[in-house]
Image (tube, coloured by chain):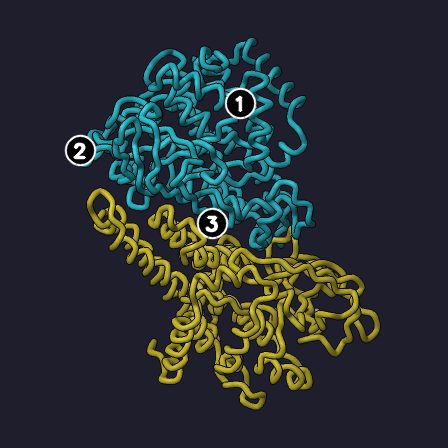
Amino acid sequence: MDLQVPEQEASFRDEVRTFLEESLTDEIREAGKMVTSVFSPVKEAMAWQTILNNKGWAAPHWPKEFGGTGWSVTQRAIFAEELVRAETPPLVPMGLHMCGPCLIGCGTEEQQKAYLPKILSGEHFWCQGYSEPGAGSDLASLKTFAEKDGDDYIINGTKIWTTYAHYANKMFALVRTRKDGKPQQGITFLLLDMDLPGISIEPIVGLDEVTEQCQVFFDNVRVPQKNRVGEENDGWTVAKYLLTFERGGQEYAPGLHVQLEKIKVMASKQQTAFGALLDDPVWQHKLAQLEADVLALEFTEMRIKSALSAGKDPGALSSMTKILGTELLQKVTELRIETLGAQATIWQPQALVPGDDQPITGPEYALTAMPHYLNSRACSIYGGSNEVQRGIIAKAVLGL
Amino acid sequence: MNFQLSEEQQMLADSAKRFVRDNSDVETHRQNKKLMPLDTATWQKLAELGWLAVPFEEEHGGMGMGPLETMVLLEALGEGLIMSPYIATVVLGGGFLRRAEAAQQAETIPALIEGRLQLAFAAEEYERVFSLENTALQATVKGDNVVLNGTKASVMNGDQADLLVVLARTAGQPGDKDGLSLFLVDANAEGIARVPHRMVDGRQGAEIRFSDVTVPGAARIGELNKGYDVAKAVLHEGLLALSAESVGSMSVLLNDTVEYTKTRKQFGLAIGKFQVLQFRMADMFIAMEQTRSLLLASTLKYVEGHEDADKAVYAMKAQLGRAGRKIGQEAIQIHGGMGMTDELGVGHFVKRLTAADGLFGNADMHLRAMVQAA
C-alpha cells in the first residue's frame, strides 16, 4: 500500500497539462471561471467539447470501441483533476454521461451507431426527461403515458426540471407503458426528437435568475417504437444501468480543493480590525474543518477508484459520494459568502453571461460567490435527493 | 416583566400585516426587484400610513415611538415581499438625524416623514470585514471643512438616497474606535460618484466614490473623532430592525414549508408524514422561536439601557445569520425543485435572510463581538 505515482502516470499528467495549455481558448477559460453551476454556458461548453472530441478525449469513461480513450482508472482521474485545476467549463453531461452510457449498455447496435458519434461531436444535444410534477424523489410514480399505435407510441404528459430542454434537439425519457403492476415495472425508456409536433417547452427561471430548467409538455406526440431502448416496460433497468456505469465516476474532491484554495486567497485580502481574515482563528477552524472533510472525501473517492482498478466492486462507498460531495460543495460555497460579507450581496448576474463586457461592481472574485451559493442548493435535490440517497444507504447497505 | 403588545403596538402590527396581505405578491416582487430605482408609489403609501414617522419626536411630526414599535412594524413587513428603503432611511438615516443638531433636524425630518427625503448609511468598504472601528475612508480636516476621499461599498439605498451619512476616519488607524467621525452629506455633492447595483434580496444598493468631497464642519453629526458611540447606537437600532424583519421572513418560510409538506405527495403519502422531515421542520420552528426570543431580549435591553445590551444585540445578529441560514436552507430542500425557482416566494425570503447575514458584519463577526463585549 503506498501513494507513489508511477512515472508513466506522472508523464501523462504533463501531457494533459500541455494539451490544456495549448488548446483552451480565452472564451472557454473565461466561461470556466464564471461557472456557478454543474451546467456550463452552452456555447462555450460545446466549443470545448469539440476541441476535446477532435483530440479523441471527449468521453474518457466510454469503452474504447465506442470512442473512449482506453485510459486506466488513474489516468481518467488525472485527466478529470487537470480539467478542474485549469477551471475548464464542465461538459454538458446529459449526452456524454447519461444517454451515451445507457445506449452503450442497453442500446441496439443500430442505436449505438446512430447516436453515439453524434453525442461525441455535439451534433445531438440531449436532455433528460425523468422527473414530473408529481414524480420527484418518487420517480417510479411517473405518469407521462406512451400508448402504442401501429409502429409508434403516442405520448401525453409532462416532464419537469428538464435541464437545457430549450437548447436540446433530443430527449431520453422514461414513460409509462403499463398502468398495472409495480410502478417500476411499467416504465419504458424512449429516445425522441425535441422538434416533434405536440412538444412545447416552458423555461423555468431559477433563484439565480438563470434559466437552466424547463417544463416540457407532450400533447399526442408520436414517437417510433424503434426509438425504444431495452424492452418495453423494462426502462427502469436501463435507467438503473446508468447508476452502475457511473459508479465512482463522479469526483467532487478535486474541484473542492481548488475552491478552498481560492477562498484562502480571498480571505487574505479581507482586512478585519485585527488583521487579515485568513489569520482569524475562527475562520481558520472553519476552513480546516472543510479541508479535513475534503481530504477524507478525496481518499474515499480514491478507494473507489482503487477497487475499480483491481476489478472489485466498491460497494457501499459509491453511494456515499453524492451526499458528501454535494453537501461539502454547499458548505464551501457558504464559507465563500461568509468570507466576502457584504461584497457577496452585490447582485449582478448579467456579468456572468459570457461575453458581457459591462463594468462590474466590487472585487471580481466576489462575482460568482452568491450565484454559486444559491445554485448549489439544488445539488442536494437533483439526481436523487440526498434524502433518497440516505434511504439507499439505510436499505441497501445497512440492511434496515 | 411584560411581553404583551400595547394596544397601540397591536394596531401597528395589525395594519402592517393587512398592508402586506393586500400589497405583497411574488409576481410584483419579481418585476420590482429588477427596477432601478424601486417603485416610488409604495414608499408614498408607507408615508401616508404614517409609518415613516414612527421613531421621530412629535415636534417634528413624528409619532414619538421607539425601537419596540419599529420591531413590531418590521416583523410584520418582513412577512411580505415589499421592498422599501425603510431601514436605510427611517431607522439608520433617521437614527442619525435624531442625534443631529436642531437645525439639521428641522431641515430634514419633516421631509423624511412625508416621503420626500431618503437617506443611506455609507459604512461598508471593500475588502474590509465590517465593524465600525475597521473603517478606513479618510476625512481630512481643513480649516472649518473636511475633505472625504475613498470608496464606500454595498450601501443600502445608496442610489436613491438624497442624503448620505458617511462614517469616516478623521484620526488613527482602522481598528481604533477613536478617530471616527460622521458626516451628513448631500448625495449629489461635487466629487461623489455613485454606481447603483441590485442586491441579492431585491434591495437597491450602490458603490459610492468620494473624490475630494468638501463637507462643511456643520454637517458633522456628533463630535469630531468621537463618532463611534453615536454610530454604534444607530447601527444597533438598524440591526434590531433588520432582525425583526428577518423574524417575519423566517415565519413565512416555516409556514410555507409546513403547508407544502401537507399537500405534496410522494410514495403515496403527504411528505409531511415522513418523520425525517417532521424532525427537520420541528428544528426550523425551534430556531425561529429562539430567534424571536433573542429579538425581544436584545430590543428590550437596548431600549432600557441594560449593561449587557450590546452583547445581546451582537447575539441577535449572530443568531439572525445562523438561524436564517438553517431555516432558509431547509425550506429550499424540503420544497425540492420548486424551492429553487424564482416563481415561489421561498427563494426570495431565503435571499433576504442571506443578505441580512452578510450586511454589517456576519454571524462569525458578531460572535467575536460578543466575546469582546464580555
Query: Residue B117 appears at what percent x and percent y?
Result: 63, 77
How far across and down, in percent of the image, does residue B39 sit?
A: 56, 69
Residue at mark 3: A205
Instruction: From the viewer's side, name the closer residue of A328 and A32.
Output: A32
Does residue A156 lie above or below A123 as drawn?
below
| CA neighbours of label 2 inside 10 A, class few (<14), some (14 to 19), many (20+) | few
Compared across the picture, whether A86 is left or right of B270 comes to right
Q: Secondary structure at mark 3?
A: strand
Instruction: Tell me, by letter, which chain the rendering colours yellow.
Output: B
- Residue A217: quarter of image: top left
Give the camera-side residue of B220 and A147.
A147
Pointer 1 residue: A121
Please identify the quadrant where the C terminus of chain A is shown. top left
- Mark 2 = which residue? A182
Q: Amino acid at mark 2?
A: Lys
Q: Please name the amino acid that badge 3 sits on.
A: Val
What numbered label is drawn on residue B234?
Answer: none
Categorize mark 1 by other alpha carbons within 10 Å: few (<14), some (14-19), many (20+).
Answer: some
Q: What residue appears at the point 61 percent right and 75 percent down from the top-left corner?
A: B96
Task: Identify which residue is drawn at 64% across, 53% down.
Answer: B128
- For marks 1 and 2, the one nearer the N-term is 1
Q: Looking at the picture, do discs 1 and 3 lie on one chain?
A: yes
| CA–CA distance in space, label 3 to label 2 | 35 Å
